[in-house]
Image (tube, grey):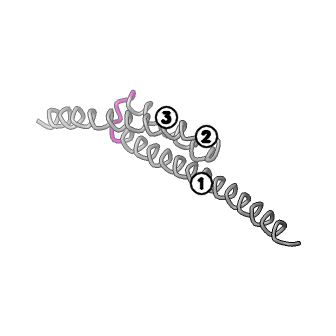
Amino acid sequence: MVGALTVGACSSLKAPATADVAVSQAAVENASSADGTEFAPAEMQAARDKLAAAKRALAAKDYKAASDYANQAQADAKLAQAKAGSAKAQAVSATLQEDIRVLRSELDRASTP
């Protein structure tokens, strides 16, 4: 009976772990597409490393570890994507501030006789 419960528990963990790994794979790909590799290289590397660990654990049928690693990879990927978005927004803001500075300078120059 204990053996049957163990087999049942393992097979019930397989589907969620497989889904977690797939979701994490998509999160890493999305973060990479959002320039996470450029703006958050450490977080992207951590996400890739944890995703690889999740895939190894899944192959070894350690579904609990696979799910844990996959969830960590997903969190790292989301952080990388958020950092990339923030860095891009800061760059746009800096560009706009510079444009405003130039316009003010031109207005000041045009208004002085």
Question: Within 10 angstroms of label 2, few (less than 14), some, or many (20 or more) residues?
Answer: some
> So how many labels did they put on this image?
3
Q: In which quadrant is the C terminus drawn?
A: bottom right
Residue shown at 41%/33% (left/top)?
A: 57
Q: Earlier in the sequence, mark 3 or mark 2?
A: 3
Q: Amino acid at mark 2?
A: Thr
Image quadrant where residue 66 sits: top left
Residue to which mark 2 is pinned: 37
Distance between the alpha carbons at the discs numbered 3 and 1: 21 Å
* Tag of residue 35: none
Q: Residue 50's x, y, as percent?
A: 49, 40
Residue shown at 61%/40% (left/top)?
A: 37
Residue shown at 64%/58% (left/top)?
A: 93
Residue to which mark 3 is pinned: 29
Residue 102 vertical placement versus 64 (above, below): below
Q: Residue 42's x, y, as percent?
A: 62, 46
Residue to which mark 1 is pinned: 89
Please state the extent of the stretch shown in magenta in the rendering.
59-64
Residue 89 vertical placement versus 36 (above, below): below
In this view of the protein, which residue sits in the foreground, 73 or 95? Answer: 95
